[in-house]
Image (cartoon, helix red, strand yellow):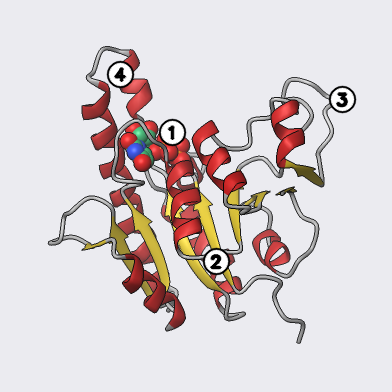
Amino acid sequence: MATPKYKRILLKLSGEALMGDDAYGINRQTISGIVAEIKKVADLGVQMGVVIGGGNIFRGVAASASGMDRAQADYMGMLATVMNSLALQDAMRLAGLPVRVQSALDIQQVVEPYVRGKAIRYLEQGRIVIFAAGTGNPFFTTDTAAALRGAEIGAEIVLKATKVDGIYTADPKKDPTATKYATISFDEAIQRDLKVMDATAFALCRDQKLPINVFSIFETGALERVVMGATEGTLVYC
Ligand code: UDP
């Protein structure tokens, strides 16, 4: 059997990925489909940290645009990521996957706090670790949490799962001539002003020489193919 290219990865899922075709919240069927994709990789023995967004429930920036205090709104956004993390944990449990959730905000009755050493131990024991509540700080995003936790746990790559299957020269929905990059360097992505992740997350990955692979979680087998080293989606390299 071929061996995976990566031993330890950080998977970033957007909150929107959990909605399926719904307008809001968590679609059970969609989440089971995502877990089935994750299971293929876990079964290969790949150690996996997961960061999940909260955009399917609440986004701080959007709420502050309509007058809410930004920091307060961001705390609500972080709590939304905790809800998604619990839903994902439960779907993983149903699929028979060993999984722990650690939160950057202290809510110990619900989930254990984030402790780096413990998270790494869980990974070594073959458990998936879901990092909830983003970075624990307002004014940040879960993309930044993914870059941060990815660097902290020594992940070899950040896999950013999106609805689109990679990074394009232009928005493929608006421009039919748009083409997908198979690979692109951090420098070229900056030069071309391509939005891979938000600027803080992108800078952190670049500084830490942590590559990013953008791919679609809705393409069957895509996650596994990336982990096996195939060219899938877009690889942003140092
Ligand atoms: N958030 C935050 N700090 C963090 C991560 C997230 O304040 O470190 C808040 C922020 O309000 C954000 C919301 O949580 O809008 C949901 O996260 P994000 O927008 O990154 O989710 P996604 O777009 O990936 O679903």
CA–CA distance in space, label 4 to label 3: 36 Å
- Closer to the chain start, of discs 2 and 4, is 2
Closer to viewer: mark 4 or mark 1: 4
Q: Is residue 55 visible?
A: no
Q: Is residue 201 above or below residue 238?
A: above
- Closer to the chain start, of discs 1 and 2, is 1
CA–CA distance in space, label 2 to label 4: 34 Å
**Residue extending furthest right?**
177
Q: Amino acid at mark 2?
A: Ile
Q: Position of residue 111 (x, y in %)?
A: 22, 62
| Residue 214, numbered label | none
Q: Are the two marked residues, 4 and 3, in contact with CB atoms closer than 8 angstroms?
A: no
CA–CA distance in space, label 4 to label 1: 20 Å
As helix, strand or loop, the secondary structure at mark 3 comes to loop
Image position of 173 (left or right of 49): right
The residue that mark 3 highlights is 177
Q: Position of residue 158 (x, y in %)?
A: 58, 55
The residue that mark 2 highlights is 38
CA–CA distance in space, label 2 to label 3: 32 Å
- Closer to the chain start, of discs 4 and 1, is 1
Image position of 57 (left or right of 108): right
The residue that mark 4 highlights is 64
Badge 1 crowding class, 10 Å Cα cut-off, few under 14, some 14 to 19, many 20 or more, is few
The residue that mark 1 highlights is 23
Q: Is residue 206 above or below residue 199?
A: below
Image position of 106 (left or right of 127): left
Q: Position of residue 133 (x, y in %)?
A: 31, 48
The residue positioned 80% from the left and 57% from the top of the image is 231
Badge 4 crowding class, 10 Å Cα cut-off, few under 14, some 14 to 19, many 20 or more, is some
